[in-house]
Amino acid sequence: MSLFGGLFNYSKPGPGVDKDAPKKKRFFYFFELFGRKFWKLVELNLLYLLCCIPVVTIGPATCGLVYILRNFANEKPVFMVSDFFDAFKSNFKQGFVLGILDLLTSGIVGVALLWYIANQGLSVAMAIPLGICIAVEILLMFMRFYTYLMTVTVELPIKHILKNSFIFAFLGIKTNFLTGLWTVLLIIPLLWLWPWLLFFILIGFSTLWFIATFNSYPYIVKYIIEPHEQQMRAQRGEDDDDYDDDDDEEDDDEPIFTDIGSQEKPALPEKKTGKQKIIR
């Protein structure tokens, strides 16, 4: 008999979930979701590490990781291995470029940051470039919360993904600081206590990216997906009020935006700026 069989017996009948029950606060909902997905996150973390062994595949592997975590955060069904590699392959080109850019920028800023920290005693003026390096490092971290997530959600050129990620870095600054705080709190012990390395091997990367994805995806929904859907309804001549009335007659839990994976080929609507995007 399994040691944890009584604790994690999901086949045992229970009271069920009331669909009219009030929604939980996102803070508590995250930990509930994290607990339910814990072993899946362990599996995903190991799969991610295996795909990152050739350093050049870190970007595509991160796309696969974030795609699965996005579905976890939205409680959508996934076939972990097949969906991971589908996202890995379909986003390989952009993921590869983003991964190289990520490594280069983080490496350059990181080396500069360490140099200024080591030499800050030489001159008071060293505090200025040191502060700039810290600010740039924080900005890169905030942008990273959105770049890969946007890559697996919206089909846009890399320059537009980077531009939008820069905007989201400031648009969601409060949430980004909260996400960054949790990231730092999880990473710092690794620098001081070597056993924490085992944590990252087992679940560290999937945990950090799950926090980032859970917190950042609502901004992409609000500022990209929902405007896209409104524009599509407008092109079809549908009125938003009529659309809302129809929703009331149907199941309240039926999603407006349905993700059918990286193989979806939706229409190409025109943006107000004249550019085009595809929601996946």
Image (cartoon, grey):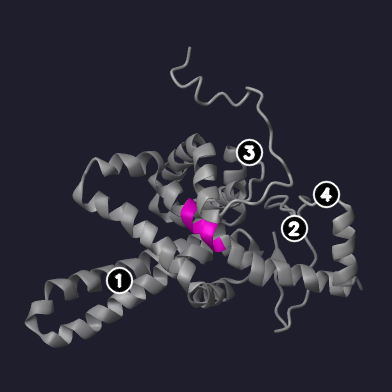
Type of secondary structure dominating the magenta stretch: helix
Residue placed under numbered mark 1 in the picture? 108
Mark 2 or 1, closer to the camera: 2
Say if mark 1 contacts mark 3, CB within 8 Å. no
Residue 3 at x, y = what percent? Answer: 43, 18
Q: Residue at x 54, y 44 (%)?
A: 33
Label number found at residue 251: 4
In front: 171, or 30? 30
**Which circle's residue, 4 or 2, is located before the other in the chain?**
4
Residue placed under numbered mark 2 in the picture? 257
Distance from disc 2 to disc 1, alpha carbons, whole Å, reads 39 Å
Say if mark 2 contacts mark 1, CB within 8 Å. no
Q: From this viewpoint, is residue 149 visible?
A: yes
Q: From this viewpoint, is residue 155 visible?
A: no
Residue 30 at x, y = what percent? Answer: 52, 49
Distance from disc 1 to disc 3, alpha carbons, whole Å, reads 37 Å
- Position of 234 with respect to 154 (left or right) is right
